[in-house]
């Protein structure tokens, strides 16, 4: 099984079960909370979008720009505006058509006309789309990608006409043309492409093969992250499939996920939020949240400035507004009832309060004396607890210090003894070479640093072994103080790395970078950089990090 097919299978498995270990209802609540959180940041996402648009527009004003470079920037602007503001996308596509005419580049002109035609189709400008596809584009001279775009636009146009035309004959003719262009698309589109997967999903839905449709949609979804617009489209398609499967909870989960991506990308043509608002009203009766979502949808629709979208939104808005007003009327009636009940309760409680106040005055003097005594006892207990904590901490540190001293005194005496033996052996070796007149050999031996490096490595290995004997959990506890991707693991055959050795010395109370650099034979700046780098990746505050290192393995 290919990796992408396996991933899609797993996604399908967990989507048809209760979304993993949690129930679908729990997941839906979390996704709705995510939508609310994203909406709170909506203005920030829109400002980021505007920043990108301003940056692209500023590039247009630079001198020395060629027509092809202007075409490329306009194409980026049109792509940015396409889900954001319909009429602005039209402006930049028309500019590109003029540039393509100046350049005499038929491919660029066809590309812009095809993009414009599809945009007209999605916005209800069917006559303009028909004129662009019929009078501006010669389909016999299109390359394969452009021919695919042409078939997509023709299919979209005729699909829209079959749905929204008021004339039955026109609808039937449009349906036949749609089926024709669907067949041409199947012959043209590359297998495995995103466009083909979207098309095959739609075909499976029409055939009521919802399991296959869901599998293809999940494979498409797996290609993207929740920060990609294609993710929102795939999630919306999964919501449609769940609706066909009569699973409203799963449908709203995918609607919410699609809406989150649209909000984050500042998509103003946001059908997912519209559908989610209507679903929340239909299945949960959440009129207040539905109305809040629809106000945002209507605001986005006005900004997007498409002809078709306001008509689509109006139907959902009317239902939601009616339910919201009904919900508000019920709340008003309930408030009046509750108000009367509260007035009655207040009258009863007033008599109770008078009685209680008399009893309270009698207890006030006794309570004051008791509180005073309790306060004195609390202060005394607090001081005693603080003193006990300080004593426990001091005792733990003394025990740890004694243990370290005992271990390192023994190690120090052993090192001294070995050093004396080595000095004696070296002295005898030198005498022997001098006696035999092997001065050059002696000079070569003392010019080499291998023995020094070996001795130093042996010393560090002894230090590492002794330290880890004292604190066997040091590496694990030290890494627990760092962010996960900053954790340090010694290589095979290595006990401590340089960074771990620096903080091992700090654990032993050697915090002066000068002493550490002398011990490890590194420069002061290197030691400082190591310490700063590690502190910057700490999970706690930087100024607390080394204090926490000094407390590793101390038992309180």
Image (cartoon, rainbow, N blue to C red):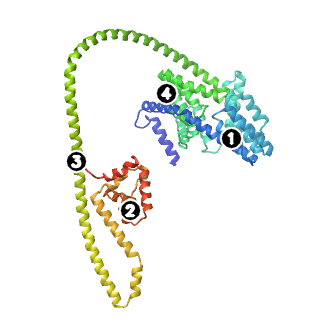
- Decide if residue 115 is on the left or right side of residue 418: right
Q: Say if mark 3 contacts mark 1, CB within 8 Å.
A: no
Q: Say if mark 2 contacts mark 1, CB within 8 Å.
A: no
- Crowding at dot 3, Cα within 10 Å, few <14 / some 14-19 / many 20+, comes out as some
Which residue is labeled 1 in the image? 57
Task: Report whether residue 286 is seen.
Answer: yes
Q: Say if mark 3 contacts mark 2, CB within 8 Å.
A: no
- Crowding at dot 4, Cα within 10 Å, few <14 / some 14-19 / many 20+, comes out as some
The CA distance from mark 4 to mark 1 is: 43 Å
Q: Nearer the viewer, mark 3 or mark 2?
A: 2
Across and down, in percent, residue 92 comes to 71, 38
Q: Say if mark 2 contacts mark 4, CB within 8 Å.
A: no
Q: Earlier in the sequence, mark 3 or mark 4?
A: 4
409 vs 428: above or below: above
Q: Which of marks 4 and 1 is nearer the N terminus?
A: 1
Which residue is labeled 2 in the image? 514
Q: Which of marks 2 and 1 is nearer the N terminus?
A: 1
Q: Nearer the viewer, mark 3 or mark 1?
A: 3
Q: Tell me the quarter of the picture where residue 506 sits.
A: bottom left
Which residue is labeled 3 in the image? 392
Residue 248, disc: 4
């Amino acid at each position: 099984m290919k990796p992408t097919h396996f991933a899609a299978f797993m996604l399908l498995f967990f989507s048809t079960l209760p979304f993993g270990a949690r129930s679908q209802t729990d997941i839906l609540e979390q996704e709705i909370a995510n939508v609310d959180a994203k909406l709170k940041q909506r203005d920030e996402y829109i400002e980021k979008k505007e920043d990108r648009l301003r940056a692209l527009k500023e590039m247009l004003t630079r001198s020395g720009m060629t027509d092809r470079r202007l075409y490329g920037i306009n194409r980026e602007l049109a792509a940015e505006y396409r889900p954001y503001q319909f009429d602005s996308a039209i402006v930049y596509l028309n500019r590109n058509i003029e540039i393509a005419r100046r350049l005499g580049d038929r491919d660029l002109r066809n590309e812009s006309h095809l993009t414009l035609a599809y945009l007209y189709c999605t916005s209800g400008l069917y006559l303009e789309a028909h004129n662009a596809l019929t009078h501006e584009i010669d389909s016999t001279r299109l390359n394969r990608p452009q021919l695919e775009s042409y078939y997509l636009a023709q299919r979209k146009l005729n699909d829209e006409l079959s749905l929204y035309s008021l004339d039955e004959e026109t609808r039937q003719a449009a349906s036949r043309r749609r089926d024709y262009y669907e067949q041409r698309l199947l012959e043209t589109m590359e297998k495995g492409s995103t466009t083909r997967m979207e098309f095959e999903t739609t075909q499976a839905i029409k055939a009521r093969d919802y399991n296959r449709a869901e599998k293809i949609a999940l494979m498409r979804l797996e290609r993207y992250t929740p920060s990609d617009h294609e993710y929102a489209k795939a999630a919306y398609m999964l919501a449609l499939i769940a609706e066909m499967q009569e699973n409203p909870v799963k449908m709203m989960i995918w609607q919410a996920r699609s809406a989150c991506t649209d909000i984050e990308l500042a998509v103003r043509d946001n059908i997912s939020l519209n559908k989610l608002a209507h679903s929340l009203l239909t299945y949960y009766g959440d009129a207040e949240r539905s109305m809040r979502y629809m106000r945002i949808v209507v605001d986005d629709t006005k900004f997007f400035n498409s002809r078709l979208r306001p008509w689509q939104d109006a139907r959902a808005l009317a239902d939601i507004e009616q339910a919201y007003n009904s919900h508000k009327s019920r709340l008003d009636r309930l408030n009046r009832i509750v108000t009367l009940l509260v007035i009655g309760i207040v009258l009863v409680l007033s008599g109770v309060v008078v009685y209680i106040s008399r009893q309270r005055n009698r207890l006030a003097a006794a309570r004051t004396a008791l509180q005073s005594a309790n306060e004195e006892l609390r202060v005394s207990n607090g001081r005693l607890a603080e003193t006990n904590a300080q004593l426990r901490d001091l005792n733990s540190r003394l025990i740890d210090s004694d243990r370290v001293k005992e271990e390192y005194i023994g190690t120090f005496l052993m090192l001294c003894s070995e050093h004396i033996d080595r000095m004696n052996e070296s002295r005898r070796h030198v005498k022997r070479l001098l006696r035999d007149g092997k001065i050059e050999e002696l000079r070569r031996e003392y010019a080499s640093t291998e023995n020094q490096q070996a001795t130093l490595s042996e010393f560090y290995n002894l230090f590492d072994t002794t330290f880890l004997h004292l604190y066997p959990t040091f590496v694990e506890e030290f890494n627990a103080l760092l962010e996960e991707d900053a954790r340090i693991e010694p290589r095979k055959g290595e006990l401590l790395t340089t960074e771990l050795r620096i903080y091992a010395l700090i654990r032993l109370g050697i915090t002066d970078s000068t002493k550490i650099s002398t011990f490890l034979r590194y420069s002061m700046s290197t030691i400082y950089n190591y310490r700063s780098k590690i502190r910057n990746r700490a999970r706690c505050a930087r100024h607390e990090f080394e204090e926490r290192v000094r407390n590793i393995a101390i038992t309180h």
